[in-house]
Amino acid sequence: MTEIPDGDMDIYDLRVTVDRIEGRSVCGMAVGDHFELTDSAHLKLPAGQHFCVYALAAVLPFLAAKQRDLAAGDWLAQDSHFACPDPEERLVMKVERTCRRRMNSADLT
């Protein structure tokens, strides 16, 4: 009998938090606002909270890479801060890994 593995890849859940706002908040977000990315592609917001779509668009391209193990010398392994493109606001977000989970890639695509 062949043993079936619990999964074939490891992936991190992430939390993206507003770390600071160096200008004026025009999108209605505040320091500490956040969303979580879990189970590879589930975006979760706390009840009653929103997240600016432009800030989301700025960090979104990096999330798939931050979910995976990166080489020690990779700049993305060192950096965890990303900025919203609005020059008036200068909103800075921090991406943190919250937990590591084993998943089956066949379940995702």
Image: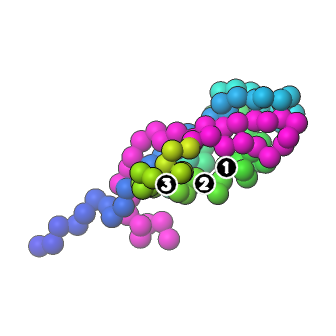
> Is residue 94 in the magenta section?
yes
- Left or right of 57? Residue 37 is left
Q: Amino acid at mark 1?
A: Val
Q: Which residues are magenta?
A: 80-109
SS for dot 3 = loop
CA–CA distance between discs 1 and 3?
17 Å
Write the residue at 73% across / 52% down. 57
Disc number for residue 59: 1
Q: Quadrant of residue 104?
A: bottom left
Q: Nearer the viewer, residue 52 or 20?
A: 20
How far is the residue under mark 2 from the one under mark 1?
A: 6 Å
Residue sitting at 62 percent across and 40 percent down?
81
Q: Which mark is residue 8?
A: none
**Residue nearer the viewer, 68 or 75:** 75
Q: Is residue 24 visible?
A: yes
Question: Which residue was labeled with disc 3?
Answer: 74
**Residue 52: percent from the left, percent from the top?**
77, 42
Q: Amino acid at mark 3?
A: Asp
Please identify the residue farthest to the left as the structure is shown: 1
Dividing the picture into quadrants, the one containing residue 24 is top right
Q: Which residue is mark 2?
A: 62
Query: Could you tell me which residue is drawn at 55 percent across and 57 percent down?
Result: 64
Q: Earlier in the sequence, mark 2 or mark 3?
A: 2
Q: Residues within 10 Å of mark 1 (few under 14, many from 20)?
A: some
Task: Tell me if I can see residue 11 in this picture.
Answer: no
Mark 3, residues whose alpha carbon is within 10 Å: few (<14), some, or many (≥20)? few
Which of 81/47 is in front? 81
